[in-house]
Amino acid sequence: MGGEFRTEKDSLGEVQVPTEAMYGAQTQRAVENFPVSGHGLPAEFIRAIVLIKKSAAEANRDLGLLDKAQAEAIINACDSLGDEEYATHFPVDIYQTGSGTSSNMNVNEVLAHLAEKHSDQTISPNDHVNMSQSSNDVVPTAIHVSALLAVRDTLLPALRHLHTGLCDKSTELESIVKTGRTHLMDAVPMTMAQEVGGWAAQIEACRERIRAVMSRLAQLAQGGTAIGTGLNAHPDFAELFAQKISAHTSHQFRPAENFFTAISSQDTSVELSGQLKVLAVSLMKIANDLRWMNSGPLAGLSEIALEALQPGSSIMPGKVNPVIAESVTMVCARVMGNDTTVTVAGQSGNFQLNVMLPLVGSTLLESINLLANASTLLADRAVASFAVNRAHIEGTLGRNPILVTSLNPVIGYLKAAEIAKAAYASCRPVLDVAVEMTDLDRETLEELLDPAHLAKGGLIS
């Protein structure tokens, strides 16, 4: 913005506001009061507040509380906001007043400015744009609306894409039998399809957990106004507002079962954050498994080769690293930390109002978007494209002494342990050692020790 200013007034007096700014005095005070992070609330969050203002104007109009011309001016102002306006005219820092009043008034002022500019109406940020509302119910409502829409439109589709990719990869790998591992040590055989299928089941379970939170996210604080009593709001406002915002979002929102709970607590946000943390834990496990399986190519496990995407070292020529898996693990670490942030913020409901609302909203949206992007990246640049080192897998599988586990029902655990120890010591295939140390013929042992047969589980006969 330029160096010119205009004078605006609020209840505290006069304030100098940049001439080109669409906002007014209260926003300018917040800009000056909170030079903390340099980061405003996410655009999705501001868009949710704007949507709330549009739905509220429609409800107030239908209830006969707001003049139709004034309502239309506010509605048109909401619809007129473009990406440039969102990037320029909502500068209030995340770390502001805990109710988010500054951001609520920022939106009120911008919409009042636009409504007056493009109509012949006089529009007050407080009396008209904020009619039947309080920052204390607008901001909790924006948290729920923005998080639900981000989950519905971004995260759940990304998880569906990852789940499909894992299922497709599992089908592709059905014929590959490998050595399973527990404690990072050799264990009984499994198919690679079983391993990847386990990852797919993890992701599907995460999807189900996140979907389960949606019904509670759909309950809105709007209508409770300052503390939950609904003071200065029409008795029918909350229900009508929910109908309006449901129509705009194609999702069925409804008034909270208890406005006092919806305004004073952020339990649903904490629940969602917890489920996002579960997803982060699952993605971390999958990404780390891929890193281990890719390790090498000579001195590691070298079961798979992840797609080579970029040089891995500024000093070691030819080195290629598992960069996508590493990127995903960093996302997971961030989301786990974000969950702690939301937990601390969620318990900051003092009496009738939570006072860390902007932090809750911005942190949830960061986690949702990071996880969505990381899930898509993992699906497209790691899972879909990794190649299998069949020769290495088959070579190590045949020398795995733990195959002797299948002989337990036939020769007993102690005898099987002797064979395993001997095979380890001599670095020979367990089959050859078992031929020498049991009365079973080679053909029978080959059948009992067949890795593909063992991977099916059950009793060996």
Image: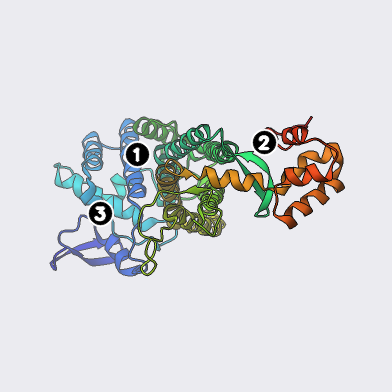
Q: What is the crowding at mark 2: few (fewer than 14 residues within 10 Å), some, or many (at least 20)? A: some
Looking at the rendered image, the quarter that the C terminus falls into is: top right
Q: Earlier in the sequence, mark 1 or mark 3?
A: 1
Which residue, given by chain and number where applicable, does mark 1 sit on? 56
Q: Amino acid at mark 1?
A: Ala
x and y percentages locating residue 58 in the rendered image: 31, 34
x and y percentages locating residue 312 in the rendered image: 39, 61
For residue 189, which quarter of the picture?
A: top right
Identify which residue is drawn at 73% across, 43% down.
431
In this orientation, which residue lies closer to the viewer: 390 or 203?
Answer: 390
Identify which residue is drawn at 54% across, 44% down.
391
Which residue, given by chain and number where applicable, does mark 3 sit on? 87
Identify which residue is drawn at 19% across, 47% down.
114
Q: Amino acid at mark 2?
A: Ala
Q: Earlier in the sequence, mark 3 or mark 2?
A: 3
- 277 with respect to 430 (left or right): left
Above or below, 447 relative to 288: above
Which residue, given by chain and number where applicable, does mark 2 sit on? 455
Secondary structure of the residue carrying tag 2 is loop
Q: Amino acid at mark 3?
A: Ala
Give the label, 3 or 2, closer to the camera: 2
x and y percentages locating residue 33 in the rendered image: 34, 69
